[in-house]
Structure formats: structure tokens, C-alpha cells
Amino acid sequence: MKLSEVQRLLGATLIWGEHCLEREVTTACGADLMSDVLAFTKDGALLLTGLINPQVVRTADVGGLSAIVFVRGKSPSTEAAIMAKELDIPLFSTPHTLFQACGILYAQGLAPCPPLAGKSLEE
Amino acid sequence: MKNETQGLLLEFPLEHYRFETAGEASSKVKQVVRQLGVDAQTARRISVCAYEAELNAIIHAFGGRMVVRVLPDRTELEVTDEGPGIPDVEAAMREGFSTAPDNIRELGFGAGMGLPNMKRSADEFEIKSSLNTGTWIRMLVRY
């Protein structure tokens, strides 16, 4: 699914990253805990979150995520928006709740991230 | 940053509660290893190791430093902090175990996944912690 389709399905506003709208995403994660995001996503995943601070953008960069969707109509903090431009991470804002937004994308075929993307702790 | 006989050595100071620059070191490390030709998945593992260790030191310790050695076949990360230490390392390694205060959780941290994420992302992981002295973590990621 292209980011432009994500934007359309979620009725989302593009905050930054028009040049990335053709980017393909295959998996998504809804979370407000950043270490969970790093534990349960793979490179290229889409993040849906209610957090708007710069650490969300930093986490997206570290985790190689494709874009961030802020839920419940939230806008990122100024610092977060500046960092997103520097790190080239597209940002969207949707009026939907986290639950609704995840449900819409899931129903349209966007897959959840497989659990424990890294190696098992028992290895 | 300076050239060693093999690879690069990067050092980053880590300041207690300095969230405005938290993660900068990890982004820099990821950028450097990608420029040196390390594949995206491996660069992500290195970056996750760096980021979780960096944040742990910023949240829990009074200060510390991270030393990263980028070598032809591996990257080694060593994080040393001066802090309260971890009373029960075995418990801290369990997913979901967290001692982070509410103000840290509001920032999106304190999920209790930091140390498990480091261990999962690294090929080698060592941790030593002494109460009232600090914590030392060494991680190695092979390409």
C-alpha cells in the first residue's frame, strides 16, 4: 500500500513529506511505547501513535520506519517536525483514534508487524 | 571521530535527562555504518543497540559515555555510566520490567524493553552493574 493510499483511507493531513507519497508500506504498528516499536517492527513499517514528541521521530529513524501517523488529530511538536524534515520521515495526522486508524488499515490489507522482529532472547 | 588502524572510533558523551539530543548518537552511528556499506537490517540492529543503551544512560544514570568501534566485519558498542547501578540485572532483562518514573513513561519510554531489545539486536551482549557505581554494557553486531 502506498503512503498516498494510507493518507486517503485515514482522511489524513500530510504534515511533511509530499515527495514520499509513492513510498510502499506493507506492515504497520500502533504504539505509544517506543521500545515496543523497536522490538516489534521491521525496516519500512508505518507507525501510528498518539505521542508527538521528537523521540517518536528519532525512534522512527533508528528503526528505519517509513512514516508516522499521529492519531486523534494531533500535530507534532515543532521540534519533532523539524527533526522529521532533517531525517526525511513523512508525517501525517488523522482525526481517527489509534484503534480506528489501525482497524481501517488492517481491514484494507496492511499487515501487522510480526512479533519479535529480532532474534529470540532464548537463542 | 578518528581513524584507527582498522575502521572508525566514535565517542559520545551521554548527559542525564538531556532528552533534546537523546538519540543523536544513535542516528549518527547508523548513518556512518550505512555509508560504510553495512546493509539496512544490520544497521538497524546496531542503531537499536545504541539507542536503547543511550536512553538507559540518559534516563537512569548521572552521565556516561558510549564508544563505538566500526570495524570491517563488526561494530562494537561499549556504554559506561556513572549511576545507581541495577539492583537485579536478571529482573531487568525480563521484558516489561521497568523502574522508569511516570514522567519518563509520558515521553514514550519505560516499556521495560530496553535491555531485552539490546540483547535481541546484538550478536554478543554483556552487562555488568554495581550498586552506587554504575553500569557497563558491551555489545557486538556482526555483518
Image (tube, coloured by chain):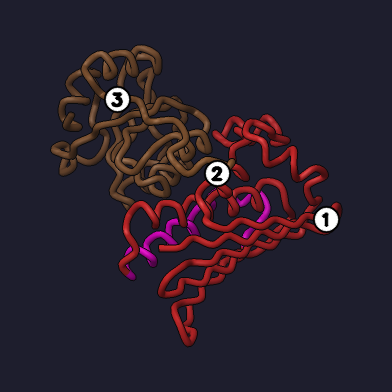
Q: Residues within 10 Å of mark 3 (few under 14, many from 20)?
A: some
Image coordinates of residue A37 in percent, x first then y, are: 46, 35
Q: To which chain does the residue with label 1 belong? A: B
Q: Specify the amino acid type for callout 1.
A: Ser
Q: In the image, A36: left or right of A73?
A: right
Q: Specify the amino acid type for callout 3.
A: Ala
| Residues at marks 3 and 1 touching, judged by CB atoms closer than 8 Å | no
**Which residue lies at the image location 55% right of the left edge and 45% below the top edge?**
A123
Judged from this view, the residue extending furthest toward the right is B132
Q: Specify the amino acid type for callout 2.
A: Asn
Q: In the image, A92: left or right of B15?
A: left
| Residues at marks 1 and 2 touching, judged by CB atoms closer than 8 Å | no
Colour brown, chain: A
- Whole-Å distance between the Cαs marked 3 and 2? 22 Å
Disc number for residue A111: 3
Position of the N terminus of chain A by quadrant = top left
Q: What secondary structure is found at the residue carrying circle 2? A: helix
Residues rendered magenta in the picture? B14-36
Asked which quadrant contains residue A22, the reply is: top left
**Which residue lies at the image location 53% right of the left edge and 38% below the top edge?**
A35
Image coordinates of residue B52 in percent, x first then y, are: 56, 48
Colour red, chain: B
Judged from this view, the residue extending furthest toward the front is A123
